[in-house]
């Protein structure tokens, strides 16, 4: 990830600075919290919307691959314990504090990074992908970079940033502190003008 702060009307100044130690743990924090809360949150949503479905009934209507993923992640014995959940809630608060201090000490407006660690995978690739010759679990390839923004309640935006050599779209994410929505929108608008139109991928 890179840091950036606004510079004039044409773009941004890139500021390279070591990320604070808690950031690499963001995906673990987010994953534990999501897995612990998902059943109750989805069940509550289904009830509030008057669907007449329980979480289990909804799960049975999902595709086989999604059933396997959800059952392993959010239902016992794979669901995190209450103790693990509360531990991650505490780590999330420390992460928020570390990120705010990082922004202040480096005078930056936003973190800038590719939204995912790889181009869009082929349909049907659901377990792991190849990144620089190494097999990486799909959840780490897709979720690692965006996890800090989710954990720290950051103002985030993904901007179309170009195409791969194969013609697939690439997204660049900008994440600022909570409440900095206008600043992030202004930064993205400035960079969008510099990048110009991004060709639509060939289908």
Image: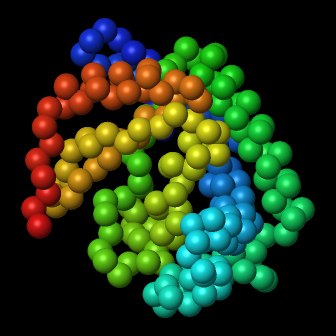
Q: Which residue lies furthest to the top in this view?
A: 8
The furthest residue to the right: 83
- The correct choice, above or below, for 185 with respect to 6 in the image is below
Which image quadrant for residue 30?
bottom right
Estimate the x, y position of residue 138 in percent, counting from the top left: 48, 69
Q: Examine the image and state in which quarter residue 188 appears.
A: top left
Q: Pick the residue in front: 34 or 2.
A: 34
Residue 109 vs 99, above or below: the answer is above
Q: What residue do we see at 78% from left, 70% from top?
A: 80
Up-down relation of residue 69 to residue 49 (above or below): below
Q: Where is residue 86 in the image (x, y as percent from the top left)?
A: 85, 55
Q: Looking at the rendering, in which quadrant would you find the C terminus? A: bottom left
The residue at the point 65 percent across, 31 percent down is 99
Asked whether the viewer can see residue 177, the reply is: yes
Query: Residue 82 appears at what percent x and percent y?
Result: 87, 65
Q: Give the x, y percent position of residue 179.
A: 57, 26
Q: Residue, x 23% and y 53% (percent of image)?
A: 169
In this view, the residue in front, 194 or 46, is 46
Q: In this view, does 203 lie to the left or right of 193?
A: left
Specify whether residue 42 is in view.
no
* 120 and 197: which is toward the camera: 197
- Left or right: 83 with respect to 120? right
């Amino acid at each position: 990830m890179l840091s950036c702060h606004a510079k004039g009307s044409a773009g941004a100044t890139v500021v390279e600075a070591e990320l604070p130690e808690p950031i690499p743990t963001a995906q673990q924090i987010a994953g534990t919290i999501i897995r612990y809360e998902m059943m109750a949150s989805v069940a509550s949503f289904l009830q509030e919307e008057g669907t007449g479905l329980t979480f289990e009934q909804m799960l049975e209507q999902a595709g086989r691959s999604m059933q396997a993923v959800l059952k392993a992640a959010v239902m016992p014995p794979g669901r995190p314990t209450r103790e693990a959940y509360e531990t991650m809630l505490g780590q999330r608060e420390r992460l928020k504090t570390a990120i705010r201090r990082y922004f202040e000490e480096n005078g930056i407006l936003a973190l800038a990074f590719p939204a995912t660690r790889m181009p869009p995978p082929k349909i049907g690739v659901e377990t792991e992908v190849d990144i620089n010759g190494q097999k990486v679990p799909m959840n780490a390839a897709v979720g690692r970079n965006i996890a800090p923004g989710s954990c720290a309640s950051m103002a985030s935006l993904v901007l179309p940033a170009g195409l791969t050599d194969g013609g697939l779209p690439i997204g660049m994410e900008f994440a600022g502190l909570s409440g900095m929505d206008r600043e992030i929108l202004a930064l993205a608008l400035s960079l969008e003008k510099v990048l110009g139109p991004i060709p639509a991928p060939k289908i």
